[in-house]
């Protein structure tokens, strides 16, 4: 499969996770992230009809923080959620300080700058193009994961580094902080109170309950009608198929689900576990987890390997009963698999890998690997952890490629004629 590259004009673009979505106006909205203290993440829109990209805003600037010399809103790691003509998303910190050999929230800002003020819940009006900050994290951390209960107008987030669970009620304009979800989160000391944080929050649209996991595989729930975080009893993700993990160490997502989405026809959710690549269902009513299939690439299945990116992949979406999954695959040289590192310390692949598009037809229970994806020059996309689906079945993501001799992370389009 051939992917077309788009250079949006942002030479500092760096590692986008999740932050790309299709919208009802037919356009694809995406955010390119920055690792600099003085450069904010950049919001763009791609018009499939015109085949053009357009800059919308620098998030630090439009939120009024660039002029005040705050460390930038350098990232967004959340999808866009559409409701009543607006897109809702959250911002995250992109500039870090190395402390004890790990990337940490800055405690010593660059000269002339203020410490990071906290991530925002944000709305974007697709007609007026107005961008509004709805609320800011009172813990002054970035918002790592977010979802929306569209029916009831609630936004839920998990912050980085500590892992506070926050809830914003749009109608009441009220923000609640429910406290940390798991130990000291990724701010903790490895081997002690360190816990990798969940990147995907699920909402059951029937009653508005939000669900997330913790590193040891337990599932927790939250409902505004009874505003405390509750462990869901009788079910967890500590399954043999997923592997064995030290939940006090970094380098994997532990027993957390990597990405999970509600599937209305079956009144249950479909999720994927990072590292093992197993597709599973979660039934909140019956408190049940069931393995469905392994949806890693065919080459990964054949050689029996875990994901090269042991956090797993976020390029997971359901459309018309079909799961679309962008996942990795091993590279072979002279008939032998090129092995990567045995372990990673932070969020990065263990080695170079190909990108494959896998589909899974839920009603038919049919898996298909559509094969590797390449650019026209023979190189291939890397650092892929997002996905959007166009109305024409084209697949979009943010990937790394070389532009004018420099590595950038930007929009690519993978042309699809049929999902299966």
Image: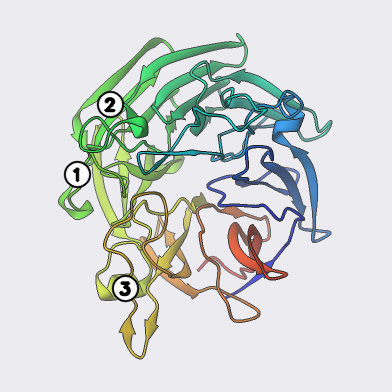
Whichever of callouts 1 and 2 sits on the residue coming sooner in the sequence is 2
In the image, taking residue 41 as reference, residue 399 lies left or right, namely left
* Label 1 residue SS: loop
Whichever of callouts 2 and 3 sits on the residue coming sooner in the sequence is 2
Return the residue nearer the eye: 212 or 366: 212
Residue shown at 40% from the left, 77% from the top: 331
Mark 2 vs 3: CB contact within 8 A: no
* Label 3 residue SS: loop
Q: Quadrant of residue 401?
A: bottom right
Badge 1 crowding class, 10 Å Cα cut-off, few under 14, some 14 to 19, many 20 or more, is some
For the N terminus, give its image quadrant: bottom right
Residue at label 3? Answer: 339
Return the residue nearer the eye: 289 or 157: 157
Number of numbered labels in the structure image? 3
Return the residue nearer the eye: 394 or 113: 113
Q: Is residue 85 visible?
A: no
Q: Which mark is residue 186?
A: none
In the image, taking residue 55 as reference, residue 133 lies left or right, namely left
Badge 2 crowding class, 10 Å Cα cut-off, few under 14, some 14 to 19, many 20 or more, is many
State the image coordinates of residue 370 (x, y, percent, origin top left): 48, 72
State the image coordinates of residue 15 (x, y, percent, origin top left): 55, 52
Residue lying at the far bottom in this picture: please name it: 334
Residue at label 1? Answer: 246
Whichever of callouts 1 and 3 sits on the residue coming sooner in the sequence is 1
Mark 1 vs 3: CB contact within 8 A: no
Badge 3 crowding class, 10 Å Cα cut-off, few under 14, some 14 to 19, many 20 or more, is some
Residue at label 2? Answer: 183
Residue shown at 71% from the left, 56% from the top: 11
Q: Is residue 229 visible?
A: yes
- Asked if residue 135 is positioned above or below residue 99 in the image, the reply reads above
């Amino acid at each position: 499969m051939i992917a077309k590259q788009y250079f949006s004009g942002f030479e500092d673009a760096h590692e986008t996770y999740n932050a790309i979505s299709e919208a009802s106006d037919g356009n694809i909205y995406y955010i390119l992230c920055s690792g600099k203290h003085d450069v904010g993440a950049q919001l763009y829109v791609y018009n499939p009809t015109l085949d053009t990209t357009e800059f919308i805003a620098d998030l630090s600037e439009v939120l009024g923080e660039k002029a005040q010399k705050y460390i930038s809103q350098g990232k967004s790691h959340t999808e866009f959620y559409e409701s009543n003509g607006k897109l809702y998303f959250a911002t995250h910190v992109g500039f870090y300080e190395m402390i004890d050999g790990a990337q940490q929230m800055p405690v010593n800002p660059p000269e002339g700058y203020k410490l990071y003020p906290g991530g925002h819940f944000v709305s974007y009006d697709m007609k007026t193009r107005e961008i509004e900050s709805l609320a800011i994290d009172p813990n002054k951390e970035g918002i790592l994961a977010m979802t929306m209960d569209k029916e009831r107008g609630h936004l839920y987030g998990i912050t980085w580094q500590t892992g506070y669970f926050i809830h914003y009620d749009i109608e009441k304009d009220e923000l609640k902080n429910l406290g940390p979800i798991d130990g000291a989160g990724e701010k903790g000391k490895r081997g002690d109170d360190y816990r990798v944080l969940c990147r995907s929050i699920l909402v059951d649209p029937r009653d508005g309950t939000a669900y997330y996991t913790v590193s040891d595989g337990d599932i927790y729930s939250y409902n505004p009608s009874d505003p405390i975080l509750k462990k869901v009893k009788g079910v967890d993700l500590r399954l043999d198929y997923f592997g064995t993990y030290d939940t006090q160490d970094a380098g994997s997502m532990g027993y957390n689900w990597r990405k999970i989405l509600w599937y209305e026809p079956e009144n249950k959710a479909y999720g994927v576990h990072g590292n093992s690549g197993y597709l599973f269902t979660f039934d909140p009513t019956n408190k049940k987890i069931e393995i469905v299939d392994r949806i890693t690439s065919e080459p990964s299945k054949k050689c029996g390997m875990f994901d090269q990116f042991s956090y797993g992949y976020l390029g997971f979406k359901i459309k018309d009963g079909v799961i679309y999954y962008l996942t990795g695959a091993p590279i072979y040289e002279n008939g032998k698999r090129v092995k990567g590192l045995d372990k990673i310390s932070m969020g990065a692949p263990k080695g170079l890998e190909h990108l494959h598009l896998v589909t899974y037809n839920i009603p038919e229970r049919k898996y298909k690997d559509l094969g590797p994806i390449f650019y026209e020059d023979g190189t291939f996309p890397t650092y892929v952890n997002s996905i959007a689906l166009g109305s024409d079945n084209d697949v979009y993501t943010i990937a790394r490629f070389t532009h004018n001799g420099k590595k950038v992370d930007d929009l690519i389009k993978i042309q699809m004629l049929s999902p299966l």
